[in-house]
Amino acid sequence: MDAVGTKRRGRNSRKKSRLTTKIEMLPQLTRGLPLTEPMSEEQILKIDDASMSILEEIGVDFRDPIALQQWKEAGADVQGERVRFDRDMIRELISSIPENITLHARNPENTVTLGGKQSIFVPMTGAPFISDLENKRRWPTLEDLGNLHKLSHMSPAIHSSAHHIVEPMDHAVSHRHLRITYSSMKYSDKTFSNSQLEKTER
């Protein structure tokens, strides 16, 4: 076999090895340090009482008809877009939240647990600019996002590919979320989050 053939076979072998190499995600961290408590129990109770008073007396505006209907069904006082909440109802809803939830990945080996003492590492999200290899600060593209999803997938210490690590500004807002979700699923089998749009943005 000549030198050219040997070189080509070596290159093909290395490429195949890269494509078939299994990247195992590092395990989640279990927090062993105690929580930081910058405030006393009395201070926390004062903040809690003030917060509940705001929810009961002033309320919160919701501009989504589905959310308004759901709050009405839950027993809140709904007047137009203004919703007021009884503190007992809020505490009951909070108590129903599980301490831990399981976030299932397409690849079961990459499923993670959120909450409690479990910690996971994910990329940041929503960057409106990116610095490229030419040290230029510019708007990100869908290709940039895909590359970041690939890096997240190949990084053992990253437990999720997140979602819109950067905003692909080369796609309209009306369908950008669909492109982002597709990129999250195409380039990684780790867990990913999602994004929401106002009705006026669709």
Image (cartoon, rainbow, N blue to C red):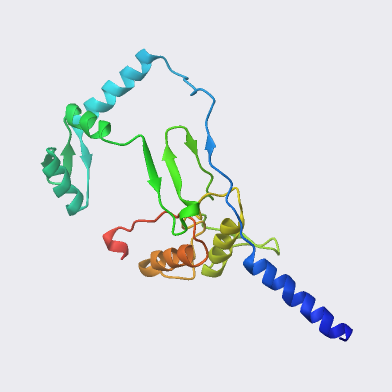
- Furthest-right residue in this view: 3
Q: Quadrant of the C terminus?
A: bottom left
Which quadrant holds residue 92? top left
Query: Which residue is painted at 55% across and 69% down in the image?
Result: 143
Q: Is residue 76 left or right of residue 166?
A: left
Q: Is residue 140 visible?
A: no
Query: Which residue is painted at 46% across and 46% down in the image?
Result: 112
- Furthest-front residue in this view: 1
Q: Quadrant of the N terminus?
A: bottom right
Image coords of residue 94 (percent x, y): 27, 33
Q: Is residue 3 left or right of residue 107?
A: right
Q: Is residue 30 left or right of residue 57?
A: right
Say how many tags the image has: 0
Which quadrant holds residue 74? top left
Q: Is residue 171 above or below residue 106?
A: below
- Most foreground residue, 36 or 159: 159
- Most foreground residue, 79 or 74: 74
- Most foreground residue, 33 or 145: 33
Which quadrant holds residue 55? top left
Query: Which residue is painted at 42% across and 63% down in the image?
Result: 181
Q: Is residue 177 left or right of residue 154?
A: left
Image coords of residue 110 (percent x, y): 49, 52
Image coords of residue 146 (percent x, y): 54, 66
Q: Is residue 41 above or below residue 159?
A: above
Image coords of residue 197 (percent x, y): 33, 58
Q: Is residue 117 visible?
A: yes
Q: Is residue 167 above or below residue 112?
A: below
Query: Which residue is painted at 19% across and 27% down in the image?
Result: 87
